Image (cartoon, helix red, strand yellow):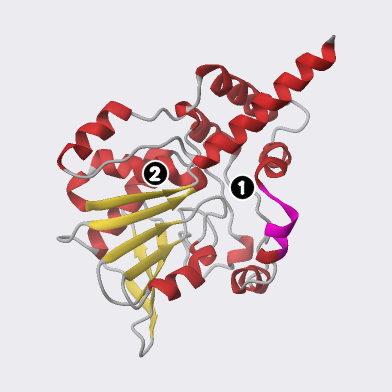
């Protein structure tokens, strides 16, 4: 199935939808020229969050940003109102990985592409590296939520915390998780800076939630939390190249906060 461009300006800024065999369409934009670069959105699940970054990189890269399946402009009906986009069926990491791979094969079938992901979509980027290393030039993970790399005790505590939020019979929603996570990773000055950005204005323009909250379905996010990093497999993939693996910042910040809370609770119990 061929994509249908919705617009293309004199600066080679392309806006289009890629139809998938499942009937879903992925909304994507391309800016600039040069080596291919794919930006996978994090918590917001929409490429809107990357518009300024894509513009800054466009003189040196052919930058693609997109909305994950079922979010904002990626919908079975490309003409639907993005502020009313329903998400009736939770997706899996495997599904999102397949979508990203379809986009990569369409955008850069012969040239390996650099993939950048942020926060909760790190499993998608790493799954791409496992599934199709021949299509991937480099993977860049920004503050990835890879909890399985944390010490077992902290990982178990985090898993228990998020699971209790999700399984709460009175309020089983992603909102409880957001109330838990955001105080650990968001600071007032960071939020104040975000409200002055073009991205924040675009969210408000489209009547989308403009906060830092996760947009995942609760079961989707639980899969992210429990997703195990195949370190040995990654090392095999990187044997022929330059591979560096560090404990991810996003997971470290949350893990440290959970561990600190546990210590304080134990100290206060006496």
Please tell me in which quadrant of the rendered image residue 230 appears: top left
**Disc 1 packing (10 Å; few <14; some 14–19; many ≥20):** some
Residue 92 place in picture, x, y as percent: 44, 38
Residue at the (71%, 36%) spot, across then down: 180
How far apart are the two marked residues, 1 and 2, measured between alpha carbons?
A: 16 Å
Which image quarter holds the C terminus? top right
Q: Determine crowd level at label 2: few under 14, some 14-19, many 20+ residues with C-alpha closer than 10 A.
A: many
Which numbered circle lies on residue 124? 2
- Is residue 172 found left or right of 48 in the rendered image? right
Q: Give the quadrant of residue 267.
A: top right
Q: Compared to 126, does 34 lie above or below?
A: below
Query: In the image, is residue 66 part of the stretch drawn in magenta?
Result: no
Q: Which label is found at residue 6?
A: none
View extreme (top): residue: 270
Residue 170's place in the image compared with 209, above or below, is: above
The image quadrant of residue 245 is top left
Residue 214 image label: 1
Q: Quadrant of the N terminus?
A: bottom left
Q: Nearer the viewer, residue 128 or 219?
A: 128
Magenta part, dominant SS: helix
Chain part drawn in magenta: 186-192
């Amino acid at each position: 199935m061929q994509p249908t461009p919705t617009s293309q300006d004199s600066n080679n800024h392309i806006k289009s939808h890629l139809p998938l065999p499942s009937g879903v369409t992925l909304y994507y934009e391309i800016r600039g020229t040069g080596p291919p670069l794919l930006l996978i959105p994090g918590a917001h699940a929409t490429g809107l969050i990357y518009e300024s970054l894509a513009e800054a990189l466009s003189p040196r890269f052919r930058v693609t940003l997109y909305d994950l399946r079922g979010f904002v402009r990626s919908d079975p009906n490309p003409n639907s109102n993005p502020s009313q986009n329903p998400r009736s069926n939770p997706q899996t990491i495997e599904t999102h990985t397949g979508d990203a791979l379809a986009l990569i094969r369409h955008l850069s079938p012969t040239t390996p592409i650099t993939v950048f992901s942020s926060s909760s979509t790190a499993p998608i980027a790493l799954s791409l590296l496992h599934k199709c290393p021949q299509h991937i030039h480099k993977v860049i993970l920004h503050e990835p939520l890879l909890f399985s790399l944390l010490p077992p005790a902290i990982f178990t505590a985090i898993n228990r915390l998020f699971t209790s939020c999700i399984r709460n019979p009175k309020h089983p929603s992603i909102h409880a998780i957001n109330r838990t996570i955001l105080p650990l990773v968001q600071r007032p000055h960071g939020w104040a800076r975000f409200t002055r950005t073009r991205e924040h204005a675009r969210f408000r323009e489209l009547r989308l939630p403009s906060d830092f909250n996760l947009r995942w379905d609760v079961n989707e996010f639980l899969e992210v939390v429990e997703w195990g990093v195949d370190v040995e497999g990654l090392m095999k993939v990187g044997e022929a190249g330059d591979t560096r693996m560090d404990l991810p910042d996003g997971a470290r910040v949350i893990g440290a906060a959970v561990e600190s809370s546990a210590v304080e609770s134990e100290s206060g119990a006496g």
